[in-house]
């Protein structure tokens, strides 16, 4: 797929943003270092969603390095420019159970564009399948495309869409165009990376939450 000059500029800005975030990761845990190096050396394929899932994975790794769940998310406009980023901050710097990556990105998105009337041209990319809480909020926002990399068999809502209350299913379906929740067009290696990064802290942190 041939990119226009504008698209190439956007891809370059995504690359620079990702590399800047990777340089900020100081955690010397071996698994974090391994994935930091892998992401730094990763070369985008020609598949359209590659840069956004890559950036989501970097945000997820940054979350891991700070002691949180490894999930990252970005919101893009119609031209593919990133307008908001989020990473999981559920446990650090202090416990806030609403601070999922998607929620953090949506907070920035809605606060920075308070008078926005139409969101049909915006997309959200996340490194991990959305949980029920984030799924319902995304339906409320009206963002038309929600694309997740790694499946979350334990907590993911998208793969269990038929278990979502009918009200929310119908709201997503009635929009014009209907909201789409599904998988991105990206290199399977990035999907694998997203799952592995999430697994770095998932068990440990879930045990902490369960003991509250």
Image: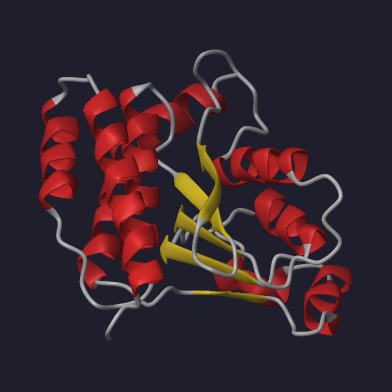
Q: Quadrant of residue 193?
A: bottom left
Residue 173 as seen in the image, left or right of residue 54: right
The colour scheme of the drawn protein is secondary structure
Q: Quadrant of the N terminus?
A: bottom left
Residue at the top extreme? 94
Q: Quadrant of the C terminus?
A: top right
Question: Is 3 drawn above or below residue 100 in the view shown?
Answer: below
Count of numbered circles in the view: 0
Say whether residue 50 is visible. yes
- Foreground of the two, 156 or 105: 105
Question: Is 56 drawn above or below residue 143 in the view shown?
Answer: above
Question: Is 40 drawn above or below residue 159 in the view shown?
Answer: above
Residue at point 25%, 72% (across, down) = 187
Residue 62 as seen in the image, left or right of residue 183: left
Residue 49: x and y, percent? 38, 70
Residue 16: x and y, percent? 28, 44
Q: Quadrant of residue 61?
A: top left
Question: Is 92 drawn above or below residue 73 in the view shown?
Answer: above
Say whether residue 128 is visible. no
Residue 179 as seen in the image, left or right of residue 155: right
Residue at point 60%, 43% (across, down) = 105
Residue at point 64%, 23% (across, down) = 96
Residue 48: x and y, percent? 36, 76
Residue at the front extreme? 5
């Amino acid at each position: 797929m041939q990119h226009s000059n504008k698209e190439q500029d956007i891809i370059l800005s995504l690359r620079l943003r990702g590399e800047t975030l990777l340089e900020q990761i100081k955690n010397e845990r071996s698994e974090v270092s391994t994935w930091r190096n892998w992401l730094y050396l990763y070369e985008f394929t020609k598949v359209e969603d590659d840069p956004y899932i890559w950036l989501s994975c970097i945000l997820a790794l940054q979350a891991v390095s700070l002691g949180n769940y490894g999930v990252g998310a970005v919101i893009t406009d119609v031209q593919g420019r990133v307008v908001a980023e989020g990473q999981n901050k559920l446990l650090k710097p202090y416990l806030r159970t609403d601070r999922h990556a998607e929620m953090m990105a949506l907070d920035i998105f809605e606060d920075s564009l308070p008078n926005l009337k139409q969101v049909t041209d915006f997309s959200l990319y996340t490194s991990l399948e959305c949980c029920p809480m984030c799924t319902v909020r995304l339906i409320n926002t009206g963002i038309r495309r929600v694309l997740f990399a790694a499946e979350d068999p334990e907590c993911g809502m998208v793969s269990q869409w038929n278990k979502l209350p009918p009200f929310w299913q119908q709201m997503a379906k009635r929009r014009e165009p209907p909201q789409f929740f599904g998988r991105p067009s990206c290199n399977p290696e990035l999907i694998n990376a997203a799952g592995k990064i999430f697994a770095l802290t998932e068990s440990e942190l879930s045990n902490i939450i369960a003991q509250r």
